[in-house]
Image: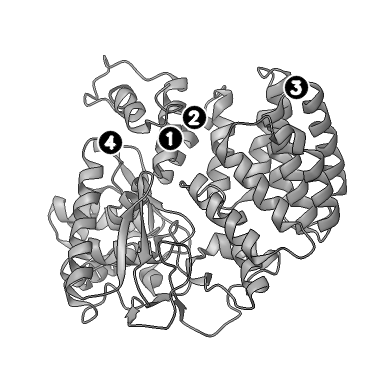
Amino acid sequence: MARRADRVDLSLRALGPRVRPRSKSKSTPRPKPDEVVEYAWALAEVGALRESLRRLEALLATDDPPVATFLLRARLCFMAWDFEGAGTWLHRHATHASLDGVQKIMSAVHEADAVLTVPGDARAVLARLSKLALKLEREREPLFATRAWLATAQGLFMRGRGAEAHAALERSRPQVERVLADRLTALWSAWEVLTRPRPDPGDLRRVLTRLEAADAAGKCRFTRFLLCRALGDAAGERECLWGALTPDFWRLAASWKLAPSEGATDQSAWDRIPRDTDGRRPAGTGPLLDLTALPAEGALTAPVRDSHGARALRILASECLAPTPLGTLHELLYLSQNFDPWYSPPRIHQVIRRLRRWLESQKLPLAVVHSRGGYRMVATGPCVIRLPLPVSQRDQAEAPAFPPGAERRWALWLAACGDRTFRAQDYAQAVGVSARQAQLDLRRSVALGRAKREGAARAARYRLCPGQGPGLTE
């Protein structure tokens, strides 16, 4: 109930003692699978995707995971722009024996939506989706029928069949008039304008503003991206949005020939001109904020003393289509630490306060605003931000590299370890460091993908990842 009432923090606090008990004794009751799924779902809502995925993988390894596990796993694929993987998990959800008729139909609609987002021949999927939409209309489910028609229109539009897509949306107009969900009706209006033969710039700007207001969480980023592109074409100028594309989004856009493919340019950075609070790009160029060297020494001296502020600056500058949730900021700033609903948000807020003070001291026309459980960076005047290419919020690009001493210790350990499992005690004895320093080195290794951890507490063992070595940070 707390999650559905948009109070995910209450859901995490209520289930935290059950899923993450302080006591590790055998008498401590184990959490139920449904409780773990609900906790993982709440983690995904706040942006803690890695921890949510880790808990879901543990459930999927069991013999009979709850049916909601497949649906949430598909949603995590959607968040990572992995639509092929989402279709696989949605198929498992749609064919589960515990679902009723309408639930199976809606799961099939989501599966078709995922398949249609990937380039390829989808005539059979489009025909099936149209039949599902008609069936939902007969079942008097206007909300689900609208979603089915929207998926059909998007699939047709992306395949160059704009007239058919517009006709499908017109067919669903009576259903939309009965829907009370603001985000869904705003999304329908956006696609109704997008599928017109020659959309008017004023209409595009109007539906873009409406969709941004209704979609504060950024769940319709792909549609907003298409609106910005159409607005740039209609107004005779291109919105500078490439700096906001993560590699996963980049690959999706490149597959539809909406963006250059990775490696198609020799540039090492993208110049991004952020949009102001009204959604329009500021005129002029303004000062240049170069973030390609962060957190290297000598660049932006104030954030260098505050490495978390430096990484927060790069993370927020890299995403302009949606606010960055608190859970995502926490995972990127504090690697290998679980999100805690009591203690993690204050730490993030403190980093943002220091970043805001630094921006004011440097007199940069940028502001960090709070938006629906996250933060986003907006422009208050002309400014250009130079970002490294590519920029991702879901890889280890922001992971801290080994200090020189730790790099040398890791090289020594690679020569002595070989391909075998080992303990932190083995590492400490081989390289001659304390147990605490060994734990720090191994934690960095796991965060950077050099090693995998198996087990917990005193039973923890480590194994080198295939193909990983001293040159990983290159």
The quadrant of the image that shows the N terminus is: top left
Instruction: Answer whether labels 4 and 3 touch (C-beta < 8 Å).
Output: no
Please name the amino acid that badge 3 sits on: Arg
Q: Which residue is drawn at 27% across and 17% down?
A: 28
Report which quarter residue 440 is drawn in.
bottom left
Q: In this view, does 90 lie to the left or right of 407?
A: right
The residue nearer to you, when weighing 177 against 347, is 177
Q: In this view, does 30 lie above or below 266?
A: above
Upstream in the sequence, badge 1 or badge 3?
A: 1
Q: Badge 4: how crowded within 10 Å, few (<14), some, or many (20+)?
A: some
Marks 1,2: beta carbons within 8 A: yes
Looking at the image, the residue that sits furthest to the left is 434
- Badge nearest the viewer, 4 or 1: 4
Q: Mark 1 points at which residue?
A: 55
**Measured Cα–Cα span from mark 4 to mark 1:** 17 Å
Q: Give residue 59's position: percent from left, percent from top.
A: 49, 29
Give the amino acid type for the residue marked by disc 2 in the picture: Leu
For the point 69% across and 34% down, the residue is 177
Secondary structure of the residue carrying numbered label 3: loop
Which label was assigned to residue 341? 4
Which labelled disc corresponds to residue 140? Answer: 3
Query: How would you rate the neighbour count of disc 3 (Cα within 10 Å): few for under 14, some for 14-19, many for 20 or more?
Result: few
| 3D distance between C-alphas at marks 4 and 2 | 22 Å
Q: Quick one: 162 or 336, which is closer to the camera?
A: 162
Disc 4 residue type (three-letter): Pro
Which residue position is annotated with label 2?
A: 59
Q: Which of marks 4 and 1 is nearer the N terminus?
A: 1
